[in-house]
């Protein structure tokens, strides 16, 4: 992982933040918001991040997630929550989802994870991304990560090569608008391999939040966050 500028050697920024603000009684937690169309693996991704089955995930012709749902976990001593959302069916439904997300996150900062599958960026994905961009505006550019599920379908090819070689202009445009932040995940693995993938993704999400200048652990950070939302 890339080192953060100004970081003391050998220390991750969230560990330093934890030590510095350990006296705060009311700590804010990172909210990870999963967005995307139906069937791309949002719920399975949430379970991978949490390290346990909390969201209903199954292969189905119909969406399995009907309501916005929040579950909590902990990473390196820092609390976080994952918010699973139903498929974006319309701008109106997304507006309602955003209101529920903000209510669940309260004053906590959040990052957006737009979930798609390897090799299947469809016109429906494109429409969904457009609605998310319109609804979340600045956070789409500053705090959005594009997550490719079914990493196994890359068949050994690196994600960087896959994206760079893609002839799908809509996909390339999406990745660019999200600051070239993307990650691939295989939710069907188990054991240490799955734990390592979850760890790498969590570190990526924390770095996105840090790069946006947010501080999730302090009262000052929460006040600044209220002004951004």
Image (cartoon, rainbow, N blue to C red):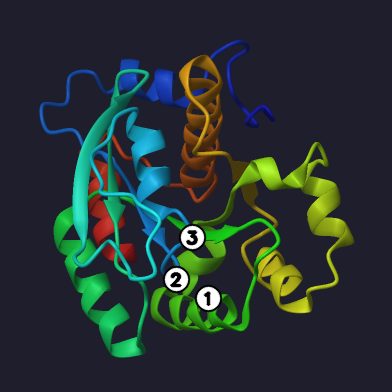
Of residue 17 and residue 194, the one placed in the foreground of this image is 194
Of residue 150 and residue 142, the one placed in the foreground of this image is 150
Q: Residue at x 53, y 76 (%)?
A: 129
3 or 1: tag closer to the N-terminus: 3
For residue 98, which quarter of the picture?
bottom left
Q: Which residue is mark 1?
A: 129
Q: Which residue is mark 2?
A: 37
Give me the disc on residue 40: 3
Q: CA distance from mark 2 to mark 1?
A: 9 Å
Q: CA distance from mark 3 to mark 1?
A: 13 Å
Q: Is residue 135 above or below residue 139?
A: below
Pointer 2 local density, CA inside 10 Å: few below 14, some 14–19, many at least 20? many
Pair 2/1: label in front: 2
Farthest right residue in view: 165
Q: Residue at x 45, y 83 (%)?
A: 131
Q: Is residue 111 above or below residue 197?
A: below
Q: Residue at x 14, y 62 (%)?
A: 103
Q: CA distance from mark 2 to mark 3?
A: 7 Å
């Amino acid at each position: 992982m890339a080192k953060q500028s100004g970081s003391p050697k050998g220390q991750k920024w969230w560990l330093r933040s934890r030590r510095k603000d350990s006296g705060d009684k009311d700590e804010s937690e990172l909210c990870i918001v999963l967005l995307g169309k139906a069937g791309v693996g949002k719920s399975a991704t949430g379970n991978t991040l949490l390290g346990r089955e909390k969201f209903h995930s199954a292969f189905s012709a119909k969406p399995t997630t009907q309501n916005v749902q929040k579950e909590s976990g902990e990473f390196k001593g820092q609390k976080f929550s994952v918010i699973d959302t139903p498929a974006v069916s319309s701008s109106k439904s997304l507006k309602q989802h955003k209101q529920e997300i903000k209510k669940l996150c309260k004053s906590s900062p959040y990052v957006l994870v737009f979930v798609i599958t390897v090799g299947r960026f469809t016109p429906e994905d494109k429409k969904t991304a457009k609605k998310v961009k319109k609804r979340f505006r600045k956070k789409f550019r500053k705090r959005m990560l594009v997550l490719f599920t079914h990493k196994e379908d890359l068949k050994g090819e690196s994600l960087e090569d896959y994206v760079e070689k893609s002839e799908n202009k809509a996909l390339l445009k999406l990745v660019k608008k999200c600051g070239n932040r993307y990650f691939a995940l295989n939710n069907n693995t188990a054991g240490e391999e799955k734990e390592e993938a979850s760890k790498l993704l969590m570190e990526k999400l924390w770095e996105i939040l840090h790069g946006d200048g947010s501080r999730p652990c302090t009262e000052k950070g929460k006040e600044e966050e209220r002004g951004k939302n």
